[in-house]
Amino acid sequence: MSHPEIPRPGKLFLSILSSRWELFQKELLCTLSRLFGRVDYESPFIPLTETDYYNRELGTPVFRRIYTFHPLVELNRLPEIKLATNNLEQEYLRDKNRLFNLDPGLLTLERLVLGTGKNFTHRIYLGQGIWADLTLIFARGDWVDLPWTFPDYASEKIKAHLREIRTNYRNQLKKGC
């Protein structure tokens, strides 16, 4: 018989995609820090070359930045976080188009789970219209993509950042904060 156990908190992960960073970056980061805590990881700009899915809405070229936040968060907060980022996307609409795409998720030692409003075969419903997308797992010492992992998240350029973030997270867990 299994015994229910509250898991350790996760590392709040946020991927931001845009082609017009100069229109919102400073203001948005202030808002994100107010909502989620201080930024403790910021990637450089990463070109999104694996898909053109966002080009029509976001413009070109699309670049990604990855952020993480301090403190750690309880895993059951993912729906609340995804709804907050959806609201931010709506607040910054220009001509009915988003200025940016926000993909929040939670990173643990075992996995990266993204929050989404879209159902699919491998996604688990969390509540409030939000689903958990098991995007990557950590196995045999590295990030492993799954048959449904989006090509950008399966790329080495993203996994390199995730390795660093996971190390930071592990160290944060050891310190107990």
Image (spheres, rainbow, N blue to C red):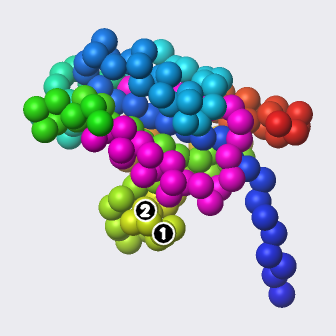
Residue 35 pos. (x, y %) = 55, 36
Residue at figure coordinates x 51%, y 67% from the top left:
126
Mark 2, residue position? 130
Seen at 68% across and 32% down, the residue is: 70
Q: Which residue does the image show at 29% across and 26% down from the upper left?
A: 18
- In the rendered view, tell whether residue 101 sits above or below residue 149: above
Q: Are marks 2 and 1 in contact (CB under 8 Å)?
A: yes
Q: Is residue 19 left or right of residue 116?
A: left
State left or right for residue 41 relative to residue 177: left
List x then y, in percent, for residue 19: 25, 21
Amino acid type at circle 1 is Gly
Secondary structure category for the residue under label 1:
strand
Q: Quadrant of the N terminus?
A: bottom right
Q: Where residue 140 is drawn, which disc sits there?
A: none
Which residues, given as a range, are shown in magenta? 64-90
The residue positioned 47% from the left and 15% from the top of the image is 44
Pick the quarter of the image with the C terminus.
top right
The residue singled out by tag 1 in the image is: 127
Mark 2: amino acid: Ile
Say whether residue 43 is visible. Answer: yes
Q: Is residue 80 magenta?
A: yes
Q: Residue 5 falls in which quadrant of the image?
A: bottom right
Does the magenta run of residues contain 89? yes
**Nearest the eye: 73 or 58:** 73
Helix or strand or loop: what does disc 2 sit on? Answer: strand
Give the left or right position of residue 26, taking residue 136 as reference.
left
Comparing 78 with 167, the one in front is: 78
